[in-house]
Structures are given as structure tokens and as C-alpha cells.
Amino acid sequence: MPTIQIRGIPVEFPHSPYQCQITYMTKVVECLETRKYALLESPTGTGKTLCLLCAAIAWRNAYIKKFRSRMPVPEVKTETQVDPVAANSPRIIYASRTHSQLTQAINE
């Protein structure tokens, strides 16, 4: 699986991405890093769902690694203790017009 660097984050992609896919993933990572809202669109068949998933997962993995490297390891973790990584992570909301598109996103 090819890995490409997007804004310093290694993103695994199942094949060599087209330029429009690299641009899309770059915008996803940029919005996650800056905690800005994004409304991204691309023509049918350009791999939007795959790009979103690959970029978001790669960014989250890098975020967790960076965040955990800066925090002290707690001596004892209780069941009620909130995960600081989850508490500080931006929320990603995926929306679609149809159930079939949502099913496709879940399957990917």
C-alpha cells in the first residue's frame, strides 16, 4: 500500500492517488489541523469517501502519537477517567444524501 506525505503526515492509500485525491486529502488534513469546518465536494467516482477515511485516520493516528508524547503517563487509570486524546480531538461528521452512500462509507 503506497504511503504519501500530506502536510508531514504519512497517509496510507490503497493505490497511487490522482492529483485531485491528493488535493482532497490535503484539505481534509488542513481542516483537521486548524480545527476549521469544511464542506468538500468532488465529482462522482473520484474517491471522496476513501480519501476522507484515509486522511482522517492518518491524521488521528499522528495526533494521538503527538499528544501522547507530550503527556505524562498516569500511574493508575480509573474507569471514570476521561481519555484526554478523545476529549481534545476534533469531531468528524460524515453526511450523505442517500442510505446507499452511507452503507458504502461504512463498508469502506
Image (cartoon, helix red, strand yellow):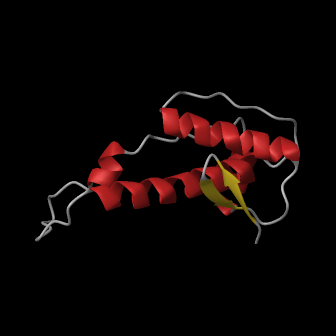
Q: Is residue 47 left or right of residue 74?
A: right
Residue 9 versus residue 21: which sits nearer the camera?
9
Q: Nearer the viewer, residue 83 or 72?
A: 72
Q: Residue at x 43, y 40 (%)?
A: 90
Q: Which quarter of the figure has residue 39?
A: top right
* Relative height, residue 37 to residue 43 (above, below): above
| Left or right: 6, with 56 as reference point | right
Q: Which of these two is toward me, 107 or 74?
A: 74
Residue sitting at x 68%, y 55% = 5
Q: Position of residue 41 (x, y in %)?
A: 76, 32
The N terminus sits in image quarter? bottom right
Instruction: State how many labels appear.
Output: 0
On-image quarter of the C terminus: bottom right
Q: Using residue 58 as the reference point, say whether residue 87 is left or right of it.
A: left
Look at 61% across and 29% down and name the residue there.
38
> In the rendered view, would you say 14 is above or below 105?
below
Q: What residue do we see at 64% from left, 51% from top?
A: 55
- Rendering coords of residue 58 (x, y %): 58, 57
Q: Is residue 24 above or below residue 108?
A: above
Query: What percent of the width, then of the height, locates residue 28?
Result: 63, 40
| Residue 64 occupies quadrant | bottom left
Q: Is residue 66 left or right of residue 8?
A: left
